[in-house]
Image: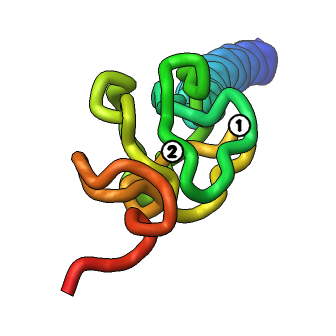
Amino acid sequence: MRGSLYEQEVLIIVLCALVLSACASYLVYRTVESRVTAAKVPQTVEVVVAARDLAVGTLIQDADLKTAAWLGPPPTGPILARDTLRNRGVVSAIYEGEPVTENRLAPIGSGGGLAATIPPE
């Protein structure tokens, strides 16, 4: 009789250990899954991009621009507001879908054409 009581105690201990390990495994799984899911969400930024190819000397108009979601970190020096681009001259070709950056544009008020491509001294 003593042997069967000992076997029952061991069985209870093993079952408790099994239940506790299953609970711990589930909690670890949920924690890791939530971190992986959070890491997969891509970050986007709204930037102004060219709606068509813009050649050197072009004066930018509203129809030349559109906003688009940019996946990941934005390029260096993007322009986020369309209002600041109207009547700015293009000094380096900007292709359709490419973000409009400050280094591709003439200074404000300098217009377009060849004069806008000459850097100030």
How many marks the image carries: the answer is 2
Which residue sits at x=53%, y=29%? Answer: 44
What's the residue at 49%, 40% (across, down)? Answer: 59
**Is 99 drawn above or below residue 68 in the view shown?**
below
| Label 2 environment density (alpha carbons within 10 Å; few <14, some 14–19, many ≥20) | many
**Picture coordinates of residue 81 (x, y %)?**
33, 27
Res 65 quadrant in image: top right
Q: Is residue 103 left or right of residue 56?
A: left
**Vertical order, 5 against 46 (above or below):** above
Percent coordinates x, y for residue 54 in the rendering: 66, 45
Q: Position of residue 49 (x, y in %)?
A: 58, 34
Residue 100: mark: 2
Res 24 seen here: no
* Closest to the observer, 85 or 2: 85
Helix, strand or loop at mark 2: loop
Q: Residue at x 71, y 23 (%)?
A: 18
Q: Secondary structure at mark 1?
A: loop
Task: Tell me the kind of residue under disc 1.
Answer: Gly
Q: Residue at x 68, y 27 (%)?
A: 51
Does residue 41 lie above or below 71 as drawn? above
Percent coordinates x, y for residue 9 in the rendering: 65, 18
Q: What number is the disc on residue 97? A: 1
The amino acid beneath tag 2 is: Val
The CA distance from mark 2 to mark 1 is 9 Å
The crowd level at tag 1 (other Cα within 10 Å; few <14, some 14-19, many 20+) is some
Q: Which of the 4 image quadrants contains residue 37?
A: top right
| Residue 109 horizontal side relative to residue 44, left or right | left
Taking depth in this image into account, of 15 and 60 the one nearest to the observer is 60
- Say how the picture is coloured: rainbow
The quadrant in which the C terminus is found is bottom left
